[in-house]
Image (tube, rainbow, N blue to C red):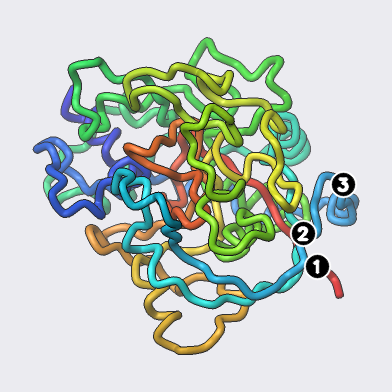
Amino acid sequence: MKKTKLIIIYAFALCIAIACKNNEKDTKQSLKSKDVPCCSSVSRVSAIVSNKSLATNIELAKDYEGMIRISGGIFDMGGDLPSGFEGMPKTALPQGDELPKHKVKISDFWMDEHEVTNAQFKKFVDATGYITVAEQPINWEELKKQVPDGTPKPAAEDLLPGSLVFHYADKNATKDNIENWWSFVKGANWRHPKGPGSSIKGLDNYPVVHVSWFDAVAYAKWAGKRLPTEAEYEYAMRGKSANKMYPWGNKKINTGVFYANFLQGDFPYRNTKEDGFEYLAPIKSFPPNGYGLYDIAGNVWEWTNDWYSAKYYYELDQTGKITINPKGPSEGFEVYNNFVKNKSIRGGSFLCHDNWCSGYRNARRMRNTPDTSMEHLGFRCVRDAIK
């Protein structure tokens, strides 16, 4: 039972955790983490409601309330290292996949001023009958393609619907073994974020979580929107400021002034909640950035439309030209494990910490397989600006 449970946990696309350490060559993986690829996912794609069966809500497609128009321009995309940051932990500084910085031109677009909320997602589900990935059984035929040959099929009870839920690690447990602080919880989904017995009652204005990329794309289609490209997200996150470390500038996060919801304390063992929140925060709990966008850093990681490629920035830089409205590579590429293809996610979450994953940095890139769902993973949408 423990073995099959481990397969499910590690096969559920925990790239967020592992990738934070991948750029440190001296990182030691536990034997358990070698049992299955760290960027695999529990696949339920074959059961997902096809986007073709979802109609766009015409009225919503005309509605721009709650969206911010962002004027396009040219910016330097990629990792920043301002003076005074050199002595910070490696995980708090630019990673290999954030370099080289390169010129990108973005056209005008509209962006949701905050993450899609539980109330907004419920309207979508009520109108369409949509069933999220986390609410569907795990497809073993798909899953076995993403684990080593000969991996035994998990028991039927271990293929029941569920999602990844965070729990604090024991003080004596290593954080490099993600089983110590993530659990696959049967019955966990957007309606029950901590699993059976939990609910979103009274949490209408909290970001929806446990949504996969497929779920986010489905919602966006219904609302007459789309997911942002990775370049659009970074451009928006920078909030009109060039070459700054964070959306709020170059002020470090340990000043006692909080601009985003992230973990204070000792990750993943305890959260001192100095920012007022232990887990998720309601939308608009922190100041907006220069564009008027809330929670563009922290609270939840957010899906983008792009495939993730560790070499994409290098390829763009090699052209010697300004890249106009990049939409990501045609397929994903992983340096450490190219077995499964991932979608880029941005912005960080309530779990981010300088000693693990500084997702609140403007240039920080992360990824997950498109059928992954987790307790700290949500999204917001964009629209092209009509000229």
Residue under the image location 53 percent in, 49 percent down:
250
Mark 1 near mark 2, Cβ–Cβ under 8 Å?
A: yes
Residue under the image location 60 percent in, 16 percent down:
199
| Label 1: which secondary element | loop
* The disc label shown at residue 65, or none: 3
Q: Is residue 297 above or below residue 119?
A: below
First along the sequence among labels 2 and 3: 3
Number of residues whose C-alpha sits closer than 10 Å to that of mark 1, classed few (under 14), some (14–19) or many (20 or more): some
* The disc label shown at residue 110, or none: 2
Q: Is residue 71 above or below residue 253?
A: below
| Label 2: which secondary element | strand
Residue under the image location 56 percent in, 20 percent down:
277
- Which amino acid does the dot numbered 3 rest on? Glu
CA separation in Å, label 2 and label 3: 11 Å
CA separation in Å, label 1 and label 3: 14 Å
* The disc label shown at residue 385, or none: 1
